[in-house]
Image: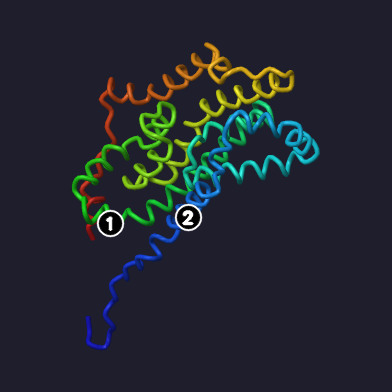
Amino acid sequence: MSADEPETAAPAKKPLWRRFAPLAVLLAGLALVYLMGWHERLNLQTLRENQVALEAWVAANLLLAVLAYMVFYALAVSISVPGALWFTIGAGFLFGVWIGTGVAVIGATIGATIIFLAARYAFADWVRQRFGRQVRRLQDGFSENAFTYVMILRLIPVMPFFGINIATALLNVPLRAYFLGTLFGVIPGAYIYATVGAKLGELAAAGEVPGLAQLIDAEIVVALVAFAGLAVLPWFYKRITGHRPAEPDADEEEAETN
């Protein structure tokens, strides 16, 4: 490099406040929910008390109601309001099984993606610097089939929904795999709880309000197990066949290093 040529400046680190600003906004939203006590309204009683007014408004403004509920659902998931199943039950209660399932799936996926991106933006660089080698090993194992792993975690939630959002963000899971894995992974659960909500609406209209356990029948449980089995099949296939991703050739590796 000649003396006249300016040196290339190293990329500046993101200011700390900028990295944490999106996450701080979400946490502030969650704090507001708790301060106002809105999370305490997520129950059957709330649906019963407002059924007539809500159903009348939905009937007169179906498209607006669907869009508004979808946005509301996405915001609730993005700030990790506890009791997300009630949002899905409410979707089935107001819109029926099929529209309710669609609303819940789209709202949950968008909301989960928002918190995923906020957490990754805030913590990914720090995690990579502090635990680089250990995290890289986990990332390598996870990235081989990230879509399937995310979908299985959604189908068989071994940790809370928000926990999956944060964990996958820290592992720097590709956005596309995360989004699609979440989208398809939440469908069975959304269908089940939307069905519960639709049944609840019918029974409430008739003056009968059974407990939640009475609304979940054997067919719904069997459907969930079947969906989970389908999600696990790709993993078993890889184990049985011993399939591994193709290794990059020497030319590709040299090109990457250069």
Residue at x 38%, y 66% (from the top left corner):
17
What amino acid is labelled 2 in the image?
Answer: Ala
Q: Quadrant of the N terminus?
A: bottom left
- Looking at the image, residue 4 sits to the left or right of residue 64; the answer is left
Image coordinates of residue 46 in percent, x first then y, are 64, 33
Given the image, on which type of amino acid does mark 1 rest? Answer: Trp
Q: Earlier in the sequence, mark 1 or mark 2?
A: 2
Q: Which residue is mark 1?
A: 126
The answer to whether 94 appears left or right of 184 in the picture is: right
The residue positioned 64% from the left and 41% from the top of the image is 69
**Cα distance in 3D space between marks 1 and 2:** 22 Å
What residue is pinned by disc 2? 28
* Quadrant of res 168: top left
Q: Is residue 209 left or right of residue 255?
A: right
* Quadrant placement of the C terminus: bottom left
In front: mark 1 or mark 2? 2
Answer yes or no: do the residues labelled 1 and 2 have beta carbons within 8 Å?
Answer: no
